[in-house]
Image (spheres, grey):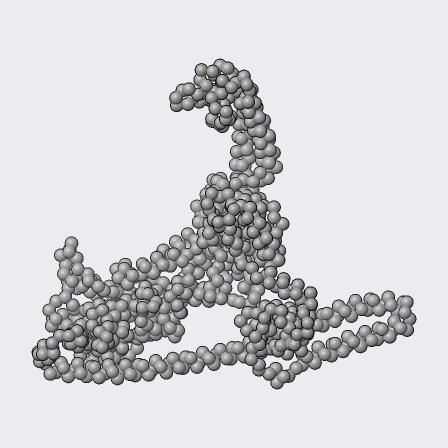
Amino acid sequence: MEKHTLEKLEFGKIITKLREKAATELGAEKAQNLEPSPDINLVTQEIRESSQGLELLMLNGPIPFGGIKDIRRAIKRSGKGQVLDLESIVSLVQTLYGFTQIKKYFAKYKEEGWEFPELEKYEQEIGDFSELEKRINGIVNNYGEIRDDASPKLNSIRREKKVLAQRIREKMDSYLHSPKLDKVIQDPVVTIRGDRFVLPVKADKKSSLPGIIHDRSASGQTVFVEPQAVVEMNNKLGSLEREEEAEIYRILKEITGRVAAKETELLQGLEAAAHLDFVMAKAQLGQEYNCSEPELNENGPIKIKGARHPLLPADEVVPIDVSLGEDFNTLVITGPNTGGKTVTLKTVGLLCLMAQAGLLIPVDRGSEIGIFSGIFADIGDEQSIEQSLSTFSSHLTQIVRLLKNACPGDLVLLDEVGAGTDPEEGAALAMALLQHLHNKGMLTVATTHYTELKAFAYTHEGIENAAVEFDVETLSPTYRLMIGVPGRSNALAIASRLGLSGEIIEQAKTFIGEHRSNVDGMISRIEKEEYAVLERKEALQREKEKLEEELTQARKEREELAARQEQMVRDFSRQAQEIIEEIREEGSKLLKEIRKYAGPAGDRMANEFNLALKAQEKRIRDLTKADDEDRVEREPLAVKPGQKVKIVSLNQEGVVLSEKDDQVNVQAGVMQIWVDKRDLIPVKEEGTSSPQTSQRYKKSKAQIIKQSLDLRGMRWEEGREETDKYLDDAYLAGLKRVEIIHGKGTGALRKGIHELLEGHHHVENFRLGGEGEGGDGVTIVELRQ
């Protein structure tokens, strides 16, 4: 696609917005490189992915990409045998965590029976790296540091270092507190020079403290002395540090080898995750612009309904319907300045580019759009002072280039064709150009002010007039596009409304001539008739769509209600039967013991027990065979937690726990089930609810807990108490993953929270937030299950 066309139709602004929607650097890179394609098979595939991405987004929310980094270079370095540094290892484990979250996201919805085949194939390309992730987590802590227990040897070295450093400090402190050295020590502090513990000593007293001088102050009054008594200990400490570095290098080398062994799979997983991020970015863009999936064809026709320019404010843009390529191949749009002619031209061109880039477009469902080998646009004032080109010359230069490159079936967009020169010659040139493009089989949309082009469109088959509507009463455009009607400049009407003398207006009409006046009158009558027809057509379409929507919704609700009722009966029957079987099994054991000691009385008890069970089984069978006519339609029952109700379809009483929309969660005996409000009737209260019911209700209320806890502004003591309580509540509520928002600040609150999380009995693991998750200001916590 021509760069000039992309610039004139502002495709780059769409790319910028798309890039902002990406959650990862890799997804943003794909968005930045997106270009329209003339391959209808490729475009069909990409639009199908975008459509499924939007469906998934609206149904389940975005795919979690937090943690995924661009580690392609690190992976390739590992394949060449270059040992990865700690930073690369940390980025790798964060990426592996992101892979795991993506796979969990898809696994959850697969279990629920939902299918998104165009997206699932990319999820399947992400391999299982759980072993590698586990190994890296075994050597790196939540702060991105090598853990002490990364290896037994490292653990031993660090313990020895800690003990030795403590001994050195104790020895140095003894010097500081020695009365003999009061006049020798410059400042009572232990400092470090070149990884050696030293003391600041007055220069003129240096002989009073035997040792090695490692540095001097700028003034020369202080020397930094390593006492002779700690030299050997410092030497040993340095040796341990070198051993520590060597062991860390060995560990990193081992991890690098594991990464190298998975090089191909890791790069494949990164590519798949990047593509999923890219698709979800397209889906989010489609959601923002209220887009839909158009039908596609090769080289036209274009039939777009309710089209909106995506870069205009949503509350200001006026939807338009445009058709081209069936009854006519050339559309000539006329009307006043600022009436929307150029916006219409840009809308058609930009939506075609977006569709060919695999993006959903802001149109109503049922729209159809062509996939063109070439789209050419000559829009706006192209004059160039540097090249000494006038508006007319620059437009003509673009048109000459266009004619050389355009082929039959291409889309051509011309703004103010023939403008910038003598009106008579400009109109003649415009008519010749439109005729040429039409004869060559190109689809053309052109805007113009020339009256001659209106008559030209009327008299030539395959060329159609269109107008942008203008309200003379309000002196403002409506931006509605009316195909089949030529537009007018409305100059005299506007002048009259603005207060120009009637005498001048009448004099102007005499200069126009009777023929022009009659034509304008005819156009005005056609516009009014066309407007009335459009209004009626739109009203009928709205009514039709409303009725269809209501009918579809009614059918859906009826089917869902029937399915829920049938499922509830099946669930109740199964659960009740299981309970009876448990009672039968336990009762049989008990009765067997009774018979040993009770004789005939035990036999009678066994018979009564079996009869009671059979009666309950019969009751369950009778309930499951209830006729549909018994399920009468009732108004939804207004309920509140703790209220006693009766489930009509199950003939079972219960207590309301919670409600969501038209569904109510009811505790019925040993069961907790969701039922429709229409299937409930109130039960008269007899005293207060039982302690067990109250307990269950309190538990249900405890489960209503947010996914995040905000500690910003709290002191550490208060934050610790709130966090501990929140983790208990979240664990009881069954939450798997929560966020602790502590902010960045000085880091004291974050450090304290991490110390609490390290040993908390409900915490499986935790990490700082990644991109799109709040960064260092948020800690992501996974709870034990």
Identify the residue shown where x is 37% and y is 66%: 289
Find the residue positioned furthest to the front: 687
Identify the residue shown where x is 47% and y is 55%: 65
Whether residue 506 is visible, yes or no, is yes
Identify the residue shown where x is 80% and y is 75%: 610
- Residue 4 position in % (x across, y down): 25, 60
The N terminus lies in quadrant:
bottom left
Identify the residue shown where x is 91% and y is 71%: 599
Whether residue 231 is visible, yes or no, is no
Look at the picture and state if 643 lies above or below 724. below
Residues 246 and 399: in front is: 246
Left or right of residue 583, residue 553 in this image: left
The part of the image, by quadrant, that contains residue 516 is bottom left
The C terminus lies in quadrant:
bottom right
The part of the image, by quadrant, that contains residue 637 is bottom right
Look at the picture and state if 382 lies above or below 243. below
Left or right of residue 694, residue 99 in this image: left
- Residue 590 position in % (x across, y down): 83, 67
